[in-house]
Image (cartoon, helix red, strand yellow):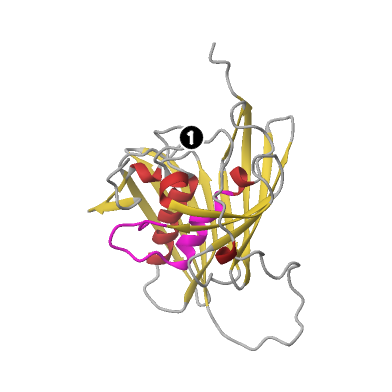
Amino acid sequence: MSDATSVFTREGDTWLPSVLSRGPWDERAQHGGAAGTLLAHLAESAVDEPGWQLSRLSIELIKPVPVAPITTRTEVHPARSTTRVTLELLAGDVLVARAHALLIRGQAFELPDGLPGWDPAQLLPGPDDCTERLAIPGMPAEVSFYHSAMDHRMAQGDTSQPGRAAAWFRPVVPLIEGQPTTAAMRAAAAADFGNGLSWVLPADRYLFSNADLNVHLHRLPVGEWIGLSSETQADGGGVGTTLSRLYDAHGPIGVAIQTLVMRERRDPS
């Protein structure tokens, strides 16, 4: 067990990830959802006026983001209705992740009745009606972002078998010590689970880590649960994609796409 109480803490200009940030492929590297929550926080912190919504977060995972001290660089490009933010995560002098965020200044207006939308309009059953925890075959049940920092409940499908599936996710610890966990941070934390949720190759024989994560939100989620309905497509050339539709308990909130690097595991012998 770990005595860590949050995924990240801050000391001056340095971010310290705890063991709760750890990913499934290497205990020395962060889960993409952990890095995603930090980048979402940095993007939202780049604007100091109310009324801005994080609508896109495109993350390039250039190298494994280590469970080690991280520094950041931020560049802000403001405009009247949009603000674009470029973010970089560095381990020492090494660039390990880069993100481009788009924030849009909100402007409320009435939508016409009967506006077409997604089908289904809700992810069912909802989180209050789901009790089975997500269990991804081959993923270690040890202190990690997946196993310890997030609560998850299966909604659709059977993760003991390959293919499409859906589940609900919520953080159970502070993502950043001393900071509120925002709606956009919750969405970023959950969105990176799509490739594990909808696996098509067994994790004991193959690697299918994502090289990027692209999250698009047409509205911010309401409530603590984020739903993913995910499907993975694979190719023998070593590249795959996962498409996840994102929900809250009231309906759709956006989409997430991951590019997967697929490899056969080396024979330990």
Q: Residue 2's image quarter?
A: top left
In the rendered structure, does residue 155 fall within the stretch colored magenta? no
Q: Quadrant of the C terminus?
A: top right
Considering every residue shown, the one lying at the far left of the view is: 12
Across and down, in percent, residue 225 comes to: 52, 64
Across and down, in percent, residue 98 comes to: 47, 48
Q: Nearer the viewer, residue 50 or 267?
A: 267
Q: Nearer the viewer, residue 23 or 87?
A: 23
Q: Nearer the viewer, residue 236 or 123?
A: 123
Q: Is residue 100 visible?
A: no
Across and down, in percent, residue 27 comes to: 41, 33
Q: Quadrant of the N terminus?
A: top left
Please report the residue visible at 59 percent of the width from the left and 43 percent of the height from the top. 196
- 80 relative to 214, above or below: below
Q: Is residue 15 left or right of residue 157?
A: left
In the rendered structure, does residue 178 fall within the stretch colored magenta? yes
Q: Is residue 159 visible?
A: yes
The amino acid beneath tag 1 is Pro
Q: Is residue 169 left or right of residue 252?
A: left
Q: Which residue is mark 1?
A: 140
Q: Secondary structure at mark 1?
A: loop
Q: Which residues are magenta?
A: 172-193
Q: Residue 167's image quarter?
A: bottom right
Considering every residue shown, the one lying at the far top of the view is: 269
Please report the residue visible at 70 percent of the width from the left and 40 percent of the height from the top. 162
Please report the residue visible at 32 percent of the width from the left and 47 percent of the height from the top. 71
How crowded pointer 1 is (Cα within 10 Å; few <14, some 14-19, many 20+) is rated as: some
